[in-house]
Image (cartoon, grey):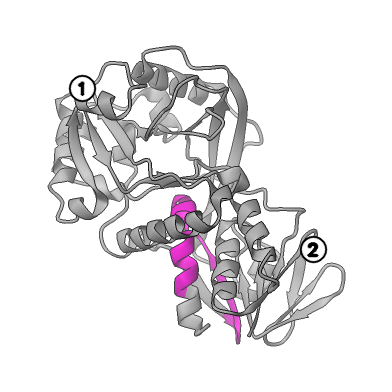
Amino acid sequence: MKVIVVGAGVVGTMHAWHAVERGHEVVHIEREAEARGASLRNFGQIWVSGRAGGEELDTALRARDLWEGIGARVPGLGFRAIGSLTPVRNALELAVAEAALARPDAAARGYELLTADEARAVNPALRGEFEAALRCERDAAVEPRTAQLALREALLATGKYTFLPDREVRDVVGEHAVRDDRGEVHSGDAVVLCTGAWLSGLVREVAGEVPVRRVRLQMMQTDPLGEPLTTSVADADSFRYYPAYASDALDALDAGQAQDPTAAAHRMQLLMVQRLDGGLTIGDTHEYEHPFAFDTLEDPYEHLTRVVESFLGRPLPKIRRRWAGVYAQCVDTTRVVHRQRVRDGVWLVTGPGGRGMTCSPAIAETTANELGW
């Protein structure tokens, strides 16, 4: 079988990976020299902790296992089974953590409630003030800026994979074929369009208006911290954005503790991961209203800096870079992904939202299973 994959972000690359793993030939087409969208502009977190129970959690757990297995074969992914800590500062935040620990699927997530001293034993860089921390042992991390490159190198070594950059697919030609902007037609037994946040042009022509929206975020990265940050770190604002934490305790938190005005205005949470070079990736904001701004705003970065420094108990290293990104999210956020047959033998896979980096290996595996690869 020959599979044509359009889009070289993490979702497209994982579709190529599963096709090659099952013995098929893959032609992988990317409109830029390499992927430059949300697949690179994220935390690199394999984030199990906050996922909704049921299909979303099952997908994340399966993806977590797949990431670990692929990471053992492709060291360039930088896979680390580091887990996460969410420090809490008061009784209202602690109650949300305790409610999460009472979930029937808490053990599957690796939830554990630690005292402040126990949390510092796990992650000594957290020298700031907090009362306790929710640990999720199943969380992990990879290097987002290099993961696709490492996967591509491994795919090229199989002899079953061809990468065609700088080609924008303009048309679906009959069944199982696409035409690029150089006029070349690429035919196979199946075509998978993994176009990320690109929802106009070809996608609109072949699929119409899909139930997917675009979301913009701001993030930043620091110089090396100078010491290990042994887990990823979130703050209690993350409780407000992840469905696993929905509870009466969360309602009480919302009613009794107003979110910082800057965090509320920009729909913020703190997520933080240390890169292999020692720097910290820190974010993020959420913007849903179109048209998106073309500039980045400073207030969110100042808020994130204050929160991080309060947990670390020390000044943040110099900010090395700041950026904005856009990802595609299903309008019905309970859906893991939008998967649609747009022509015979041609499928569109998009809209994983902020779970794309986490869930992409399992999303692609499901596509492969459903298409009978």
Task: Evaluate whether residue 333 shows in this view.
Answer: no
Residue located at (48% from left, 55% from top): 72
| Front residue of this view, candidates 47 and 323 | 47
Q: Is residue 364 magenta?
A: yes
Residue at image location 57% in from the left, 67% down from the top: 17
Q: Kindly identify the residue that appears in the image at 55 percent across and 64 percent down.
A: 14
Q: In this view, does 193 lie to the left or right of 83?
A: right
The location of residue 132, given as percent across then percent down, is 20, 27
> What residue is shown with label 2?
167
Tag 1: residue type?
Answer: Asp
Residue 229 place in picture, x, y as percent:
41, 28
Q: Does the magenta stretch include residue 301?
A: no
- The magenta-colored residue range is 342-366
The disc label shown at residue 117, or none: 1
**93 up-or-down from 192: above or below:** above
Q: Position of residue 356 (x, y in %)?
A: 48, 55
The three-letter code of the residue at mark 2 reads Arg
Q: Count the labels in the image.
A: 2
Residue 174 at least partly seen:
yes
Distance between the alpha carbons at the discs numbered 1 and 2: 54 Å
The location of residue 180, given as percent across then percent down, is 80, 70
Q: Is mark 2 on a helix, strand or loop?
A: loop
Element carrying mark 1: helix
Farthest right residue in view: 182
